[in-house]
Amino acid sequence: MNRKKIYNPNSKEGVNGRKIFGGDPTGIFELNNIKYQWAYNLWDMMLNNTWFPKEVDLTGDVKDYKRLTSAEKRAYDKALSQLIFMDSLQTNNLIDNINPYITAPEINLILVRQAFEEALHSQSYAVLVDSISQNSDEIYDMWRQDAMLKRKNDNIAKIYEDLGDNPTDQQLVKAMFANQILEGIYFYSGFTFFYTLARSGKMLGSAQMIRFIQRDEITHLLIFQNMINATKKERPELFTKEFLDEIYEMFDEAVELEISWGVHITEGQILGLTNEIIEDYIKHLADKRLQAVGLEKRYHKEHPIKWVDNFSSFNDQKTNFFEGNVTNYSKGSLNFDDF
């Protein structure tokens, strides 16, 4: 598979001939004719969701952080360090590894927007680190010191690095699944720790920042789930039993890795996050992601912390989130019927 040409005047491809990948685009963003309407719907939603870290008041968190238990501080710093890595990786991955092979302009559009949002999330974490933490350098260098964090980072990065300079069609589809896992399991799991602290009245500004970030991640998850489902229709021959076995194995590895990480950072000392809850929640998330792309559930675990869904949602909010300014948090509600 070759990277698409930036300018391809010899292309005769019309809108109906567009493909997720392997197409022959002109390089012109002709957005009045759309094949993948879901992509343009997401583009519009992502624009409506625009926000900036300065909208979040962190003054209370500065005092709260000093009053956290040593276990809570440790978990906060490690969870933040992990999120920093994932958004750093994803910003580069989307631009360097994924988008060059995507040949539908409306999808190129939302991948570029996603990369911007991932970069914005990195700025958000920098604001959290600079405003709150007493261990700024330690947080950014934690992957060098924490063997579990290094193992997780290496595992996530390897799948993207396997794309290489000339990926096969199946390798690119596998990278789509890897993005689904990153956006829909790893990030969701990491966010839950901040919501757990906020539920007990601690670090409310941090949770508010995470809530903005998670709203973006929902659209990112939808991007890759729709890309996978569209590819299944366009290229069903790629989804062989052997390939799907690889995908299920990738999910198994991700679930095991995330459970180990969750247990590692909480050490059984964070109220509301027992080892059993962590395991059940991650397995529940994995099943949801599998079902969203037409694959079979694998773990069959009920949602153990349903309060998280309402706690993190922007939809149908009657009151302000953590006494925040309602005008800041009512933008871009998600309507999944469009996808």
Image (cartoon, grey):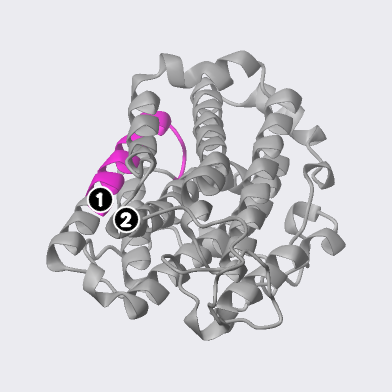
- Could you say which quadrant of the image residue 220 lies in? bottom right
Marks 2,1: beta carbons within 8 A: yes
Query: Mark 2 sits on what residue?
Result: 174
Query: Mark 1 sits on what residue?
Result: 250
In the visual, does 173 lie left or right of 330? Answer: left
Residue 262 seen in the current view: no
Q: CA distance from mark 2 to mark 1?
A: 9 Å
The N terminus lies in which quarter of the figure?
Answer: bottom left
SS state under label 1: helix
Q: How far across and down, in percent of the image, does residue 195 sit?
A: 57, 48
Q: How far across and down, in percent of the image, does residue 71 sit?
A: 48, 24
Tell me what residue is drawn at x 41 percent, y 33 percent.
Answer: 266
Residue 192 seen in the current view: yes
Amino acid, disc 2: Lys
Q: How far across and down, in percent of the image, does residue 103 sit?
A: 51, 65
Q: How many marks?
A: 2
Specify the segment rendered in magenta: 251-272
Residue closest to the eye, 225 or 319: 225
Does the magenta run of residues contain 262?
A: yes
For label 2, count other residues whose C-alpha is less than 10 Å away and answer few (under 14), some (14-19) or many (20+).
many
Residue closest to the eye, 167 or 313: 167
Tell me what residue is drawn at x 21 percent, y 58 percent.
Answer: 248
Residue 86 got which mark? none
Amino acid, disc 1: Met
Mark 2 and mark 1 lie on one chain; the one further toward the N terminus is 2
Residue closest to the eye, 105 or 256: 105
Query: Taking 307 as reference, is 123 above or below it?
Result: above
